[in-house]
């Protein structure tokens, strides 16, 4: 079953990027870094709308004349040549991006939503241009369709979840979780509950009693496929004030991540 899951796992990641950006653009550092943009985009082929978050690395700065573009890799070019498939200059309410990424920025943050139908496994480049800022861009492959075939919760001494799903093209890791809260078509995800990351197409893992108590009933298992860029980004970095460390990034000419994500779910059989 297809779901639209809020990417609330990006909250600490985006905070890490912002904190690191604050460190990097210290006025004492060499000039030029304050021309950079922070770009976050997680392309989902299940949607034609692709929210792009952008803000200046220098948080006291503003972004003017922003344009977000999506390019598709030309067949056989191996990402060396690109075709423009979407472009927008329209600035949407930042809540549009905030709801998708589970994150809110101050007034300097912008949300642009280019519209394009994406193909599984094909490489795409997201690019943001703005006045008096370096062009920022990142590329990834759109993760493919997949289905969750089985999900089972074994109760007893040591509760265990077992699940199986089909492989998703271009997926690097799968985040597996019990659904916590549903509101319309938006659900909370990993930040507040139990989850496990696996690189295969099945999992058998113990689940804490607390996680089961927090999960909504009837139980639903959510599986999120991520490309290597998005997973590496959220699994790294530290926003601590004493030892701020950048997360892994793939944005050229700026900071942040361009990745791909896809969600599937299945009702859990309890035994």
Image (cartoon, rainbow, N blue to C red):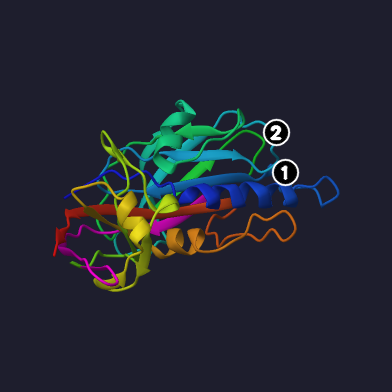
Q: Residue at x 17, y 59 (%)?
A: 147
The mark nearer the N terminus, 1 or 2, is: 1
Q: Is residue 265 visible?
A: yes
Q: Which residue is drawn at 50% across and 53% down?
A: 257
Q: Please state the extent of the stretch shown in magenta in the rendering.
A: 135-162
Q: Determine crowd level at label 2: few under 14, some 14-19, many 20+ residues with C-alpha closer than 10 A.
A: few
Disc 1/disc 2 C-alpha distance (Å): 8 Å
Q: Where is residue 32 shown, x and y percent of the image? A: 75, 47
Question: Which structural element holds mark 1?
Answer: helix
**Image marks 1 and 2: residues in contact by CB distance under 8 Å:** yes
Is residue 213 left or right of 107 when viewed as pictured? left
Instruction: Identify whether 72 is placed above or below 113.
Output: below
In magenta stretch: residue 150: yes
Q: Where is residue 73 shown, x and y percent of the image? A: 35, 56
Q: Where is residue 223 shown, x and y percent of the image? A: 27, 58
Question: Which structural element holds mark 2?
Answer: loop
In magenta stretch: residue 197: no
């Amino acid at each position: 079953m297809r779901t639209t899951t809020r990417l609330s796992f990006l909250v600490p990641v985006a905070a890490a990027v912002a904190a690191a950006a604050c460190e990097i653009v210290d006025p004492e550092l060499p000039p030029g870094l304050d021309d950079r943009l922070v770009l976050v985009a997680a392309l989902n082929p299940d949607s034609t709308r692709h929210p792009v978050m952008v803000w200046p690395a220098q948080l006291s700065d503003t972004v003017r004349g922003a344009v977000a573009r999506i390019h598709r890799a030309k067949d056989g070019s191996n990402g060396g040549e690109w075709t423009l498939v979407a472009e927008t200059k329209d600035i949407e309410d930042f809540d549009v991006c905030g709801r998708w990424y589970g994150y809110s920025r101050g007034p300097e943050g912008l949300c642009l939503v280019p519209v394009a139908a994406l193909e599984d496994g094909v490489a795409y480049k997201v690019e943001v241009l703005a006045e008096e800022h370096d062009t920022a861009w990142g590329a990834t492959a759109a993760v493919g369709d997949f289905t969750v075939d089985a999900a089972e919760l074994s109760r007893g001494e040591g509760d265990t979840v077992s699940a199986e799903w089909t492989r998703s093209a271009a997926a690097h890791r799968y985040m597996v979780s019990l659904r916590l809260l549903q509101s319309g078509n938006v659900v909370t995800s990993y930040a507040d509950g139990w989850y496990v990351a696996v690189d295969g197409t099945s999992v058998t893992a113990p689940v804490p009693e607390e996680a089961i108590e927090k999960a909504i009933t009837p139980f639903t298992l959510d599986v999120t496929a991520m490309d290597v860029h998005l997973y590496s980004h959220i699994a790294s970095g530290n926003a601590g004030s004493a030892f701020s460390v950048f997360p892994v990034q793939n944005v050229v000419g700026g900071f942040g991540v361009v990745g791909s994500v896809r969600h599937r779910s299945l009702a859990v059989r309890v035994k």
